[in-house]
Amino acid sequence: MIPRSKSDKNENKPPPIIRCRVRCPMCQEASYQYRMNNRVFWNRDIDIDLQPQNYAKLDHVDPDFHPPLYYMWYCPECHFTAGYRHFIHPLKDVYVKTEAVSTRIREAYAAKENFHKLVNILSRGLDIEHMDFFQGIKLHLLAVLELELIEDMVKQYFLNLGRYCLHLAWLYRDLSNKPEALATTQPRLEELYEEVKDLWPDMPRTEYEALYKAVKYYDQTFERSPQVKTVIDEVSILQVIARICIKLNKRDEARKMLTSSIERALEARDKIEVKLRDTGEEGKKLTADQTADMVTLSRRLRTIADENKQLIQLLAEERLKEHTIHAKKLLKANKGRDLTVLKRILIKNHIDRRVIAKLLPEDKKKGVFPW
């Protein structure tokens, strides 16, 4: 159970979550949901894959309150589940009617026994009034299950599928860093996994599996989703994929994505700069608003490119650290051997030449002159 305030004396202070009544876009039934109050808590750091970390809270908020548990909204009538930002208008900017999607979900619930069982299992015992990690993880899984059912109808959902899998990975990560919650939640999760293993074989059960699925769906977003409309969309998604690949220790893939993002960003920025300098053959000048928009876009592209360069530098530094640790172990295991032999050992083990030069520096030859 996640308490929302420390004691009754804080009743007049802003709560961390706000109760609101919303209508489900699929079945039109109204229900109460909880919206996070961003005035009460905020994150001070982010992980490499953009996970908010190190939450700060106002003094009256219970220290055990965990905001990510309230990311999903859930309709108790039809079981439709989505992130709170997308629940009310899940088909925004998509040319598919809500009725078609709700019909697909209803038909699957009625005709597909496995889907019916999975929805019942994942929605069993949900109580948004007393959220905990077990319920939060089940809601994320339910949202992913429903979107995978209709992904062929709405390509826009590739983006939400990637997003939801990423949030699920964050929740698994948070749980692993909370020993008390892990001790009570993991046994329940193991029971859940055992119950659904034949119904949903590729259900993401760990942080790694959720991150892997997130990469898959972000990649499909980049390749196929109509949501990717601008160069900003392109370079941003490539950066997100790269960040997740770094978490998965797939550094070559991450570097490839970052390089592609940089090239696209700088190419688009160069075109904008040329257009800003050029009034055109017919002498048509840009309006003040057009100029302002293009300058803003140019700066955003430059910022993304700079962020990508920093990530590539981070990858290079991590690679050198790992090579240094490995090289030191090799040198320790071959202590006392000739310098030339040691260098050959490091080269044979593909140790970076900069690490070799640092750990086994050449003796400087003295010249004729002492200086």
Image (cartoon, rainbow, N blue to C red):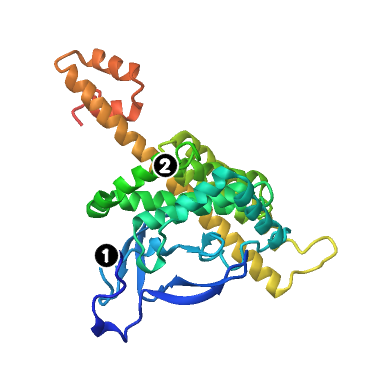
Sort mark 1 into few (<14), some (14-19) or many (20+) by Cα contacts within 10 Å. few
Question: Does the image show residue 316?
Answer: yes
Which numbered disc, 1 or 2, marks the residue that appears first in the sequence?
A: 1
In the rendered image, residue 265, in percent from the top left (x then y), is placed at 59, 51
- Which quadrant would the N terminus be assigned to in this image? bottom left
Q: Which residue is mark 2?
A: 195
Give the amino acid type for the residue marked by disc 1 in the picture.
Asp
Give 190 or 206, whichever is nearer the viewer.
Answer: 190
Alpha carbons under labels 1 and 2: distance apart = 30 Å
Q: Residue furthest bottom?
A: 12
Categorize mark 2 by other alpha carbons within 10 Å: few (<14), some (14-19), many (20+).
few
Percent of width and height locating residue 346: 30, 20
Residue 233, image x, y percentages: 61, 54
Task: Give the foreground label among 1 and 2.
Answer: 2
What residue did someone put label 1 on? Answer: 64
**Residue 52 position by quadrant:** bottom left
